[in-house]
Amino acid sequence: HRLARRNHRQLAWLMALYFQSLLSSANVDPVNVVLLRHRPSGMVDPFPIWRSSREAFDDYQSVQLNTRRGYFRRPIWASFAAVPGGRTLFLGLYSAQLTGPVAEGSRDPFGGHLLEPEKLDRYACALMPELRDYSGRLFIDWGASPRAWVQRGDTKKAITELYEENREPEHPRQGGDPEYEPVVFPVFQYVRPPACGGAGLLPVRPA
């Protein structure tokens, strides 16, 4: 099979159809992970920020509501971004540690407004080497609740697409730009696994 011959290494994905399986393969316990799906809010769109300045994105991500400490106390954050078409792109794994409320006088790095220490926490975040090769390449199915942007790491998330290389288009696979269509290697898409798991799963070509 030509697809199998060209992408022998990628066939390992048949054993890791869920993002949680990928975490486990990197010796990361999903129980210690929180999933974040960053999406546009007001005038701020986190995906272009991540694409143009990782430092600015890290600053943006490091401030979170203190009412969500129950989620953010998990030591590893798996960051994703909402991109056009309702798709969810993996950005990377981050170690995260609460340092306390944001400092008095701190301002939002993009809106410029003052941050409220009584409502907001600051975390020390650092990009981890685990799964770094999949940053900007891997997409998951976030599920039927896109507004639930913070979820537990052991929540099942099916892998839907994988690019051969990180092309970092402005909007991945958005139609009309020949520079990004087609990609170098056909996007790997999978039939959703049956309830019993593994059997009968095959890579299928994109439409």
Image (tube, rainbow, N blue to C red):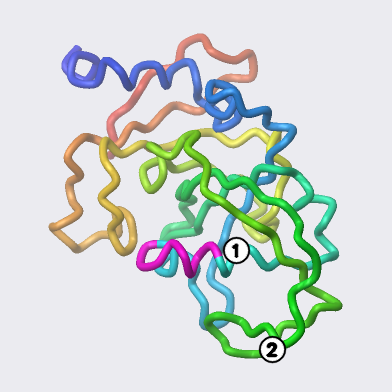
Residue 165 x/y as whole percent = 26, 40
> Which residue was labeled with disc 2?
114
Left or right of 39, for residue 53:
left
Q: Quarter holding the C terminus?
A: top left
Position above or below: 154 against 88: above
Label 2 SS = loop
Q: Of residues 41 and 116, which is closer to you in this image?
A: 116
Residue 108 x/y as whole percent = 61, 82
Q: Residue at x 43, y 62 (%)?
A: 54
Residue 109 x/y as whole percent = 55, 80
The tag earlier along the polypeptide, 2 or 1, is 1
Q: Quarter holding the N terminus?
A: top left
Left or right of 91, for residue 145:
right
Left or right of 148, for residue 15:
left
Task: Tell me which segment is drawn in magenta.
Answer: 51-58
Q: Amino acid at mark 1?
A: Gln
Q: Residue at x 54, y 13 (%)?
A: 198
Q: Residue at x 50, y 41 (%)?
A: 140
Residue 92 x/y as whole percent = 49, 46
> Which residue was labeled with disc 1?
61
Label 1 SS = helix
Q: Residues within 10 Å of mark 2 (few under 14, many from 20)?
A: few
Whether 13 is among the magenta residues is no
Whether 53 is among the magenta residues is yes
